[in-house]
Image (tube, rainbow, N blue to C red):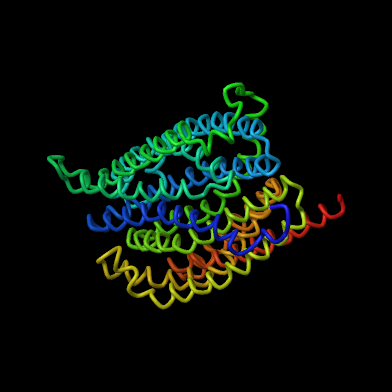
């Protein structure tokens, strides 16, 4: 990291590829669940869609809240401070645990409001039961993110990948046992999918805990850990930045989640089709997010050793890598729009509607990819306040009104809901690009 020659396509890919596979693993859990739930029927798929749209908002917020650990650790690793890394980990773990408990309570209270959200009455009870079971995993996930984000901050993106990928097998086994009834267990239907997810997520937490406890590659970054005390000031500093980053990351997901609720106003067929399209959208997102994490890690490590000239190099190389990938995803979604929905549902109406959604999905791949890269670069510079406001502006105050306008006022119905996303993601990209340029100029003036 001491010279610009070490910033290369291979250095980005070395960090980013395991994260892509890790994202693939997490996404595959959801896709497999949706495919298996789709075998139960359209009503079950719609109920899962409604519950997941809301639950995932909390989880993405929690992921963002924990994500601040990565650039903080990256900077401490860059300047070789193991004591500082230990302080960040212990206080970050406490902050994440507290947030996990708080989110669990909030989600429980939110489940009491499901019947007032204008959804088809037939899905309210199964969606609520499924949602409450998923909520059991909220705290374990937040604790898991503490380990995962610390590991990624040290440059180890491979371990999280292996744990998440192996959790897929645990999830599939759990689904088979509890959804359809195996080994003497009575079939639990939709709730069985939630039970399989519970088992997989507790496994993920346990696996990372054992690795941190016994593997030297983590112990060396945590020298002095036993002497570090939990400090409310340190927790507050981490939580303040984590809260802003959590809001930033959940805002985009919130726009998609609220769009899903609006689609639900038009019937369960549209909601089931929306779940199909959202599941497939994660195929591109996992790649972009992997590259984004690599960008954050490298930028933060450059900051740690004050190699500011390398910061722009990282963002430029990541952008050059992500553009052709996003264009390939665009072609893939548009060409395969007719047969991809068949994997998820046998309902012809669901398939037809989902195929229309995939056209719009393909259109916004490029701006989505670029806004992830530049928001990740800004995140690596530990700048979270203004980007949070800019994200809220583009996704909430631009995307949702545009979606509502086209769906309900201009009568484009379900497909109109999707029209706000390409606009919001394009605006978000320009916001993040300009913010990154501004921060670089400010760094140049201070040198």
| Relative vertical location of residue 73 with respect to residue 357 in this rendering, above or below | above
In front: 157, or 421?
Answer: 157
> Residue 427 in the image: x percent, y percent?
65, 64
> Residue 82 in the image: x percent, y percent?
64, 34
> Residue 224 in the image: x percent, y percent?
61, 26
User: At x 62% / y 61%, what residue is drawn?
Assistant: 371
Q: Quadrant of residue 13?
A: bottom right
| Relative vertical location of residue 326 with respect to residue 438 in this rendering, above or below | below
Q: Quadrant of residue 394?
A: bottom right
Query: Taking 274 as reference, is 433 left or right?
Result: right
Query: Taking 354 as reference, is 213 left or right?
Result: right
In front: 3, or 319?
Answer: 3
In front: 339, or 2?
Answer: 2
Image label count = 0
| Relative vertical location of residue 72 with respect to residue 341 in this rendering, above or below | above
Residue lying furthest left in this view?
184
In front: 427, or 127?
Answer: 427
> Residue 392 in the image: x percent, y percent?
62, 52
User: At x 44% / y 34%, what residue is drawn?
Assistant: 209
User: At x 60% / y 64%, what residue is drawn?
Assistant: 9
């Amino acid at each position: 990291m001491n010279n610009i020659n070490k910033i290369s396509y291979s250095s980005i890919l070395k960090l980013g590829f395991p994260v892509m596979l890790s994202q693939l693993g997490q996404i595959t859990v959801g896709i497999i669940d949706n495919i298996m739930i789709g075998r139960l029927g359209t009503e079950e798929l719609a109920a899962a869609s409604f519950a997941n749209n809301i639950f995932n908002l909390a989880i993405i917020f929690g992921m963002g809240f924990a994500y601040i650990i990565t650039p903080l650790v990256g900077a401490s690793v860059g300047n070789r401070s193991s004591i500082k890394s230990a302080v960040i980990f212990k206080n970050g773990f406490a902050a994440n645990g507290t947030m996990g408990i708080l989110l669990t309570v909030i989600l429980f209270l939110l489940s009491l409001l499901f019947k007032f959200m204008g959804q088809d009455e037939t899905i309210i009870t199964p969606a609520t039961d499924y949602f409450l079971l998923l909520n059991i995993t909220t705290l374990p996930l937040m604790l898991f993110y503490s380990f995962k984000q610390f590991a990624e901050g040290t440059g180890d993106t491979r371990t999280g990948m292996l744990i998440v990928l192996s959790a897929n097998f645990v999830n599939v086994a759990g689904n088979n046992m509890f959804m359809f009834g195996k080994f003497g267990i009575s079939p639990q239907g939709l709730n069985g999918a939630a039970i399989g997810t519970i088992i997989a997520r507790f496994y993920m937490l346990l696996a990372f805990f054992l690795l941190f406890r016994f593997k030297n590659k983590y112990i060396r970054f945590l020298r002095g850990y036993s002497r570090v005390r939990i400090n409310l000031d340190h927790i507050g500093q981490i939580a303040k930045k984590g809260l802003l980053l959590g809001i930033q990351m959940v805002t985009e997901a919130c726009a998609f989640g609220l769009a899903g609720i609006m689609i639900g106003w038009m019937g369960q067929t549209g909601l089931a089709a929306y779940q199909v399209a959202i599941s497939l959208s994660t195929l591109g997102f996992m790649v972009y997010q992997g590259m984004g994490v690599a960008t954050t890690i490298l930028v933060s490590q450059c900051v740690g050793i004050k190699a500011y000239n390398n910061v722009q190099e990282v963002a430029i190389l990541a952008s050059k890598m992500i553009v052709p990938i996003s264009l390939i995803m665009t072609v893939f979604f548009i060409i395969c729009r007719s047969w991809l929905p068949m994997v998820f549902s046998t309902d012809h109406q669901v398939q037809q509607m989902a195929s229309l959604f995939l056209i719009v999905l393909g259109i916004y791949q490029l701006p989505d990819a670029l806004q992830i890269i530049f928001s990740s670069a800004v995140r690596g510079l530990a700048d979270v306040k203004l980007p949070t406001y800019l994200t809220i502006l583009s996704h909430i105050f631009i995307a949702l009104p545009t979606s509502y306008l086209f769906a309900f006022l201009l009568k484009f119905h379900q497909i109109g809901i999707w029209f706000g996303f390409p606009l919001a993601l394009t605006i978000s990209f320009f916001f993040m690009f300009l913010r990154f340029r501004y921060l670089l100029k400010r760094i140049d003036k201070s040198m």
